[in-house]
Image: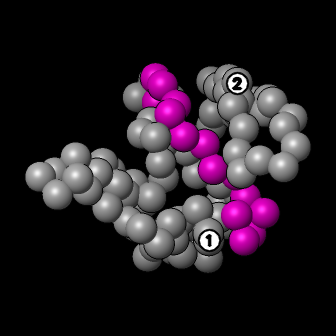
């Protein structure tokens, strides 16, 4: 948080998310912070763009530096909650 109480942490910009969806046909994004949108982004552009495409948003991931740039497969097991805006999930990465 800065002096005005605005959080600052890394995330995906709206432009990068749009590029990834259009040019790389991604099905979701994951990040090690507690939000895929940057801390000072109050529009939640990445969340909105990914979810509008029925994609998945994963936050608070760990050990991402151990994954290869390509080739890993994920197994995602969300807790099936009703009437919520999100859910805790277990995420496992299988590395070739």
> Mark 2 highlights which residue?
90
Image point (25%, 56%), residue name = 6
Which quadrant of the view contains residue 78? Answer: top right
Residue 32 horizontal/vertical position (percent): 44, 36
Residue sticking out furthest to the front: 4
Of 12 and 5, nearer the camera is 5
Q: Where residue 90 sits: x, y (%)?
A: 70, 24
Q: Is residue 67 left or right of residue 72?
A: left
Does residue 55 show up? yes
Stretch of the chain drawn in magenta: 51-64
Which residue carries the number 1 mark?
49
Q: Residue at x 11, y 52 (%)?
A: 3
Q: Residues within 10 Å of mark 1 (few under 14, many from 20)?
A: some
| 56 horizontally vs 16: left or right | right
Position of residue 30 relative to residue 26, above or below, is above
Residue at screen point 65% across, 64% down: 50
């Amino acid at each position: 948080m800065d002096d005005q109480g605005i959080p600052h942490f890394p995330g995906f910009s709206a432009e990068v998310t749009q590029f990834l969806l259009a040019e790389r046909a991604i099905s979701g994004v994951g990040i090690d912070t507690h939000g895929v949108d940057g801390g000072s982004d109050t529009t939640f552009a990445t969340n909105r763009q990914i979810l509008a495409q029925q994609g998945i948003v994963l936050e608070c991931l760990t050990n991402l530096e151990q994954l290869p740039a390509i080739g890993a497969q994920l197994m995602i097991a969300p807790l099936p909650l009703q009437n919520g805006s999100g859910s805790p999930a277990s995420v496992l990465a299988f590395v070739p």
